[in-house]
Image: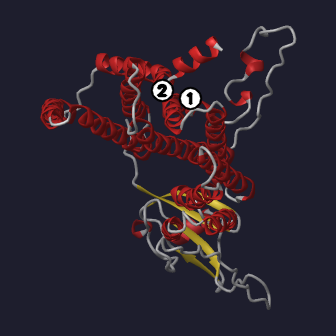
Amino acid sequence: MSGIATPRRRIALVGDAGRVDLALPLDDTLDDALRTAGHPELDGNLVVIGPGGHQVDRATPCDDLVDGGLYAVVDITATAGVGVVPERRAQHVPRRDHGAHWWLLGVVALLVVASGFGVSLQPWRLLGGIGLTIGALICAVIWARRDAQRGRDAVVGVAAPVAQAVVGGMMIVPLALESMLHQANVSGLLAAAVTATVVAVTALPSPIRAASATAATLLVLLAVLWGTTLMMQWGVQAAAAVSAGIVPLALRALPSTLVNVPEGYFIDYRHFMSSRWTVRGAVPESPGEVREDSIRRIVADSSARLLLGTGLLSLIAAVCLPVAVLGDWQDDPFVVAGGIALMTCLALALLLTPRHTTSRTLRWMPRAAAAVVVLCAGIRLSALLGSDALVLGAGLLFVCALVAVAITVPVSRGARSLGLSRFGDFIEWLSVALALPAALLFADVLDQVRGMMSG
């Protein structure tokens, strides 16, 4: 015959001897539980504290106890130390900035606007440029040394002095020099690269150091590009076109350069590799125990690099393309074809590349740059067509509206298409591959090659 299970109350009793888990019949008392746990007697200083923080009588039936509750046997006369009052530890209260990074950005904007009034006065222009550059370095060091800054606030706080250094470096170049604007851009980029390098060396938070190092690398490469075009006697329009054409390639290659960890983090080579790739090939060492804090630091640094790198490349595309395409174009059909291909490839690459990321900020920064590219294309097209541009623009807007209406319903219902996704990948790869050749074609590289071959 099978017996009937007796209802029991499950509690946990904690004392000096440790924790004891008990399952007691409902008709027992708390005193029976204490005796079972090894507390036959309780003096006047020992009491039982229930889950609610109140004292519980020993005669309480188990039926009135909390099922699964924790009951502690404590000494109410115990103190932390005899005759010693424990000191209250000083708590670190985080400093509230009240949006200080946005105030810093606003002050930089005011300084830039104020320096523009003395742009034609050479002594004041030189002094203003030196002052802005030195002030940017000091401000960047002070801001970077503050360990309370994290995330986008830190990026904005460091971006403001870097932008100020660009303006200061541009103002140092005298107006009377030949190719003054080209040299000013090179000087501004070098000043910004130096400021970002100083931040990368002096910053306390690791994400700021990582982001600043990425910014310094990109700014140095951009300064080298503009310096090379200056030595080759290319114009500002050509240098801006090449700078914009490199952006899709850089955006595509940026994620693969972010995670800087030894090879042993990816795979245990010593365990899985049966043969070496060369006779002298060394097996990468295993990192051993992988800790959570180190992984979090690596992820935070890589995220900061990706955020600042994507933002800086999007800014380069949004600034350089208007300089390149809104000027005067040559009558050469290759140059015209290169300009049209550059705007098309750049817009498609900036629109399709963010599909691979899940961050809203990383998706919309390139798309904002793509909006600038489309706007420049519309302005250029309206200048070429004249009065017919309004009719064509209205027709294109109407077609875009019809397409948006057609895809809104299936997208809202969660429709997915692998074929369209693969087609989008093909268009993206084609745009990334053709953006730089189109920029070189628009920069009239063919004429430069003809000149070198004929010389």
Residue 91 on image: x %, y %: 65, 77
Residue 116 on image: x %, y %: 51, 65
- Circle 2 packing at 10 Å, graded few (<14), some (14-19), many (20+), is many
Q: In which quarter of the image is residue 423?
A: top left
Q: Left of 76 or right of it: where is 382?
A: left
Using the image, determine if residue 158 lies above or below residue 400.
below
Q: What separation in Å lies between label 1 and label 2 (alpha carbons)?
A: 18 Å
* Residue at x 63%, y 60% (from the top left corner): 19
What color scheme is it?
secondary structure
The reply to whether residue 37 is in sight is yes
Q: What SS does tag 1 mark? A: helix
Q: Nearer the viewer, residue 278 or 405?
A: 405
Q: Nearer the viewer, residue 375 or 69?
A: 375
Q: Say which amino acid is labelled 2.
A: Ala
Q: Left of 105 or right of it: where is 353?
A: left
The residue pinned by badge 1 equals: 253
* Residue at x 51%, y 37% (from the top left corner): 240
- Circle 1 packing at 10 Å, graded few (<14), some (14-19), many (20+), is few
Q: Say which amino acid is labelled 1.
A: Ala
Q: Which of 33 and 277 is in front in this view?
A: 277
Residue 370 on image: x %, y %: 37, 38
Q: What SS does tag 2 mark? A: helix
Using the image, determine if residue 275 lies above or below residue 209.
above
The C terminus, quarter of image: top right
The reply to whether residue 297 is in sight is no
The residue pinned by badge 2 equals: 439
